């Protein structure tokens, strides 16, 4: 029989063990594991937790908004349009509308910053996310951070919004798929989808199977003949017949997913992240006039560039004079600018916390026969708890234009034309992992 002292010691040890066990159990709910990447077996459809919320609204005849976040494959008038039309035909009692949130040439690293502005503020009931091709060169860890940020922002905005990952095809992806595995980017997304119970549809798997059966060619400039479908001209962007295949895959997948789908609140899934350094805090902040030196001007709504890019970038500010400055403060770890590259683009001098970066940053590259949306990294790896000051200045020299010469018929003459002259910088938003400080 224990003495009083022994009993007290026993109770103390028991209490400590109990507290530790509770702490460990709770920590398991809120702390991310350290995921390890491995190729994932390719499946055409993985229903997981389904699409119960949006399907319930469709069946009840309620209005439904479907968002499409992705790159050029989704930006094209292809599977995006065809699937929206299929939903409308399949559920004629429901008013089905589309949220076009795709931008060519962009991946999830930009998508995580723009998802709120381009998609979530329009209150989607279903969000398709398509970045498996444009994320093809990214490391799994980078994909996880960005894609998880998209997921968590979506459910933080509305935990009843359903999400579906889709994996499109590009030449080269058949190498993994013929072995039975999803390519690296899709495999990384599948591991994240498993964690959050997000359904996925692997378009690429069926494209490769059709090619193996002799029913499709991946890439062709001419009609294939004999009923064989030419999927694309460039091995990436589907022709109409390729988009039709994608749309049919979605239709079949929705029927399969619907068999096990029930309405669900996704909020409890946010308790435990997949990776600790996810980008849920990523945001897009408009540039304010007070951040700019007097030389900057706001492009009018009827300006050619505003009409082309304003719907994505908001107000566009332009600086053409060397020495023009953009200055702001932020508390966070990294910041980028959402800007335009173009044939008349200048270059930037970047200073962070009083330290000038050693190299100027050109806003021109080998594709710059036209203007397009881009981002420029300004600062990264900073102390997230500190306030940092950034100054971006237009350099007096214009970038070397020779990198684009191979695209021109007569580069000697064309590169001297007004089109390729200037130190012009055009910016729309600040992409910050943190918060802008007044």
Image: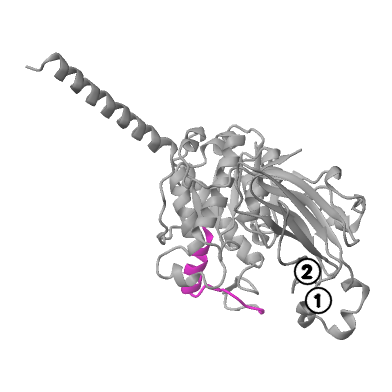
Residue 206 magenta-drawn?
Answer: yes
- Whether 212 is drawn above or below 353: the answer is below
Of mark 2 and mark 1, the one earlier in the sequence is 2
Region in magenta: 202-222
Residue 132 x/y as whole percent: 56, 60
Give the class, few, some or many, for how many residues have Cα within 10 Å of label 2's Cα (few <14, many ≥20). many
Residue at x-position 78% and y-position 65%: 363
Residue 159 appears in which quarter of the rendering?
top right
Q: Furthest-left residue in view?
A: 1
Q: CA distance from mark 2 to mark 1?
A: 8 Å
| Residue 221 visible, this angle | yes
Residue 351 x/y as whole percent: 74, 56
Residue at x-position 78% and y-position 71%: 368
Between 2 and 238, the one nearer to me in the picture: 2
Q: Left or right of 97: which side holds 46?
A: left
Please give the residue where the numbered disc 2 appears in the rendered image. 364
Between 90 and 271, the one nearer to me in the picture: 271
Q: Furthest-top residue in view?
A: 4
Please give the residue where the numbered disc 1 appears in the rendered image. 401
Residue 320 x/y as whole percent: 90, 61
Residue 311 magenta-drawn?
Answer: no
Helix, strand or loop under label 2:
loop
Residue 410 x/y as whole percent: 85, 85
Q: Are marks 2 and 1 in contact (CB under 8 Å)?
A: yes
Residue at x-position 78% and y-position 62%: 348
Q: Which mark is residue 315?
A: none
| Residue 98 visible, this angle | no
Give the class, few, some or many, for how many residues have Cα within 10 Å of label 1's Cα (few <14, many ≥20). some
């Amino acid at each position: 029989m224990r003495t009083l002292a022994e009993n007290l010691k026993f109770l103390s040890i028991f209490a400590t063990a109990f507290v530790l066990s509770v702490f460990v159990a709770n920590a398991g709910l809120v702390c991310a594991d350290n995921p390890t990447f491995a190729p994932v077996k390719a499946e055409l459809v993985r229903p997981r937790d389904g699409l119960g919320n949006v399907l319930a609204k469709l069946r009840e005849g309620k209005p439904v908004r479907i968002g499409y976040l992705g790159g050029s494959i989704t930006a094209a008038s292809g599977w995006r349009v065809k699937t929206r039309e299929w939903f409308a035909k399949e559920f004629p009692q429901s008013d089905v509308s589309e949220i076009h949130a795709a931008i060519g040439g962009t991946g999830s690293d930009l998508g995580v910053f723009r998802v709120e502005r381009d998609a979530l503020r329009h209150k989607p009931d279903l969000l398709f996310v398509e970045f498996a091709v444009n994320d093809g060169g990214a490391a799994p860890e980078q994909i996880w951070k960005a894609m998880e940020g998209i997921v968590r922002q979506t459910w933080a905005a509305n935990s009843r919004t359903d999400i579906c990952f889709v994996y499109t095809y590009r030449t080269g992806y058949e190498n993994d798929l013929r072995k039975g595995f999803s390519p690296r980017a899709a495999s990384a997304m599948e591991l994240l989808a498993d964690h959050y119970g997000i359904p996925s549809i692997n378009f690429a798997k069926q494209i490769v199977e059709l090619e193996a059966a002799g029913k499709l060619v991946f890439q062709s400039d001419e009609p294939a003949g004999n009923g064989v479908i030419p999927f694309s001209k460039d091995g990436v962007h589907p022709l109409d017949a390729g988009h039709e295949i994608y749309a049919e895959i979605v239709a079949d997948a929705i029927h399969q997913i619907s068999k096990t789908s029930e309405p669900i609140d996704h909020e409890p899934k946010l308790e435990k992240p997949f990776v600790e350094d996810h980008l849920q805090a990523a945001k897009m902040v408009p540039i304010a006039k007070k951040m700019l030196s007097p030389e900057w001007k706001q492009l009018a709504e009827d300006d050619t560039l505003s009409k082309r890019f304003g719907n994505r970038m908001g107000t566009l500010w332009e600086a053409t004079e060397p020495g023009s400055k953009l200055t702001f403060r932020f508390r966070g770890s990294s910041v980028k600018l959402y800007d335009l590259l173009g044939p008349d683009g200048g270059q930037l001098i970047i200073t962070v916390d009083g330290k000038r970066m050693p190299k100027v940053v050109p806003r021109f590259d080998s594709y710059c026969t036209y203007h397009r949306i881009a981002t420029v990294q300004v600062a990264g790896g900073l102390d997230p708890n500190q306030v940092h000051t950034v100054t971006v200045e237009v350099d007096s020299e214009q970038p070397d234009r020779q990198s684009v010469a191979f695209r021109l018929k007569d580069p000697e003459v064309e590169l001297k034309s007004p089109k390729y002259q200037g130190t012009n910088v055009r910016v729309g938003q600040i992409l910050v992992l943190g918060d802008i400080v007044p």
